[in-house]
Every structure is written in C-alpha cells, then in structure tokens.
C-alpha cells in the first residue's frame, strides 16, 4: 500500500513540474515553419528526380 501511495505522489509531482505541458506558441510556430520548409525542399528534390 505504501509503495502505491509513493508511486502516485511521484506521478503527481512529475506532472505538476511542467513535464506534461505543451510547447509555447512561439516554439510551435517555429517548428511548423521548419516542417513546412523541409516539405518544400523534399518536394523540390522529388521534382528534380522526375526530370
């Protein structure tokens, strides 16, 4: 019983410390821009292979 309580307390502390939070809006938009740029480069590369 003690082990279960300690485990549950550890989970509560872990999630309250910010480990389960989403990235900020700036970080998310930067990641989206990087993903878009990578997709454009990949598409351009694929078009170059087809020719």
Image (cartoon, helix red, strand yellow):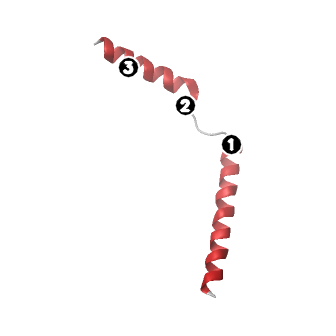
Left or right: 11, with 46 as reference point: left
Residue 27, image x, y percentages: 68, 44
Mark positioned earlier in the residue sequence (3 or 1) = 3
What is the crowding at mark 1: few (fewer than 14 residues within 10 Å), some, or many (at least 20)? few
* Residue 25: mark: 1
Q: In which quarter of the image is the C terminus?
A: bottom right
Residue visible at 56% across and 24% down in the picture: 17
Q: What element carries label 2?
A: helix
Residue 7 badge:
3
Q: How far apart are marks 3 and 1 (CA)?
A: 32 Å
Q: Residue extending furthest front?
A: 49
Query: Up-down: is 12 above or below 48?
Result: above
Report the quarter where the N terminus lies.
top left
Residue 3: x and y, percent?
A: 32, 15
The residue shown at (38%, 20%) is 7
**In terms of sequence position, does the residue under pointer 2 or pointer 1 come before the other?**
2
- Residue 15, given in percent of the width and then of the height, sits at 50, 26
Q: Which of marks 3 and 1 is in front?
A: 3
């Amino acid at each position: 019983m003690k082990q279960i309580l300690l485990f549950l307390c550890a989970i509560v502390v872990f999630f309250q410390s910010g480990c389960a939070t989403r990235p900020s809006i700036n970080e998310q938009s930067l990641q989206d821009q990087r993903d878009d740029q990578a997709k454009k480069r990949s598409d351009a590369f694929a078009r170059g292979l087809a020719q």
